[in-house]
């Protein structure tokens, strides 16, 4: 059963759109009269899709799309547009709306557009809905670079799907996570020194591969916990190595140090995160990226 929320302050248009959708087998239709009421309905019933008018009092369709992007980013929104509102519809698409349909074409196009957006399988829709409620996730990794790469891509996917960061910020934060995991792999669990990397990169990798099968290194694991909040992302990476004294970390931005391979991970973590915190033992790092809500933009209340 697909659940669809229709939002419109005009009773005639609300009923017209709703009746078109109600005729489809397996579709349950809910109603709201403005954006604020729609957000309440979304929070209570978590619909699979929202069809909304563009021009409404209290909170218009564009503002609703922005709010949904921040709070319910995996629920697609379809805008119903009136004559002359095409430019704002384009703006709404850029802000996260999935599609739009002119009100003059509701009878011809609405059901088809909604059907295509709901074409995901029940399982996929369920997984996407669950992601809206994902607050944290934990992993325990073997010393395996392929697993590390897969984890970084998975976390990046979670962040992108929830619209928590823009594409550039997402890539940089994923890079910081990757550097933390690489450090946990090479320097933490396998205890391969940065000095060896500077002298012979090939020997550095060969020693790491050898130690993956030797005790005590082969029994060590990498622990990762990612927490998703509206105001910040937190990723904690912990290895089971002996650690180090964080106070002994050199400044990677000092003259002559930037060109050295050692210290690059710390530099990138500190550059791409708002906070990079090592524990006293030196076998755990916490990466924090704050989320800045989109700046309020002026939207025309009426479009001719």
Image: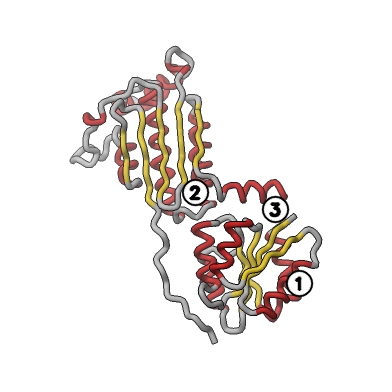
Q: Say whether residue 31 is left or right of residue 175.
A: right
Quarter of the picture containing the C terminus is bottom right
User: Is residue 116 visible in the rendered structure shown here?
Assistant: yes
Quarter of the picture containing the N terminus is bottom right
Tell me residue 192's x, y (percent).
35, 22
| Outermost residue to the top | 215
The residue that mark 3 highlights is 120
Tell me residue 267's x, y (percent).
30, 40
Tell me residue 254's x, y (percent).
19, 40
The residue that mark 1 highlights is 19
* SS state under label 3: loop
Which of the two residues, 165 or 279, is positioned nearer the viewer here?
Answer: 279
Above or below, 301 against 69 in this view is: below
Which of the two residues, 142 or 240, is positioned nearer the viewer here?
Answer: 240
C-alpha distance separating marks 3 and 1: 23 Å
* SS state under label 2: helix
Q: Say whether residue 48 is left or right of residue 218.
A: right
* SS state under label 1: helix
Q: Earlier in the sequence, mark 2 or mark 1?
A: 1
The residue that mark 2 highlights is 159
């Amino acid at each position: 059963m697909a659940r669809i929320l229709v939002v419109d302050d005009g009773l005639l248009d609300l009923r017209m759109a709703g009746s078109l959708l109600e005729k489809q087998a397996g579709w349950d239709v809910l109603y709201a009269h403005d954006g604020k009421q729609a957000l309440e309905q979304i929070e209570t019933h978590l619909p699979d899709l929202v069809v909304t008018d563009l021009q409404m009092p209290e909170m218009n369709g564009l503002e609703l799309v922005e709010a949904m992007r921040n709070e319910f980013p995996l629920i697609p929104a379809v805008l119903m547009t009136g004559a002359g509102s095409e430019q704002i519809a384009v703006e709404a698409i850029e802000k996260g709306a999935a599609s739009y349909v002119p009100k003059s074409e509701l009878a011809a196009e609405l059901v088809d557009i909604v059907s295509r957006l709901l074409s995901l399988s029940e399982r996929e829709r369920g997984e996407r809905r669950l992601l809206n409620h994902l607050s944290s996730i934990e992993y325990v990794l073997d010393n395996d670079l392929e697993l590390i790469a897969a984890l970084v891509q998975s976390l990046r996917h979670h962040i992108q799907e929830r619209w928590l960061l823009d594409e550039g910020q997402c890539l940089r934060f994923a890079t910081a996570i990757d550097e933390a995991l690489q450090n946990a792999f090479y320097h933490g669990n396998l205890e391969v020194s940065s000095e060896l990397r500077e002298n012979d990169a090939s020997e550095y990798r060969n020693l790491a591969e050898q130690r993956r099968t030797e005790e005590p290194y082969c029994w060590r694991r990498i622990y990762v916990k990612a927490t998703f909040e509206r105001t910040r992302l937190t990723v904690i990476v912990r290895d089971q190595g002996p650690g180090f004294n964080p106070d002994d970390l050199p400044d990677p931005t000092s003259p002559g140090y930037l060109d050295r391979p050692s210290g690059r991970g710390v530099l990138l973590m500190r550059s791409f995160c708002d906070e990079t915190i090592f524990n006293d033992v030196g076998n755990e790092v916490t990466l924090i990226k704050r989320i800045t809500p989109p700046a309020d933009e002026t939207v025309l209340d009426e479009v001719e």
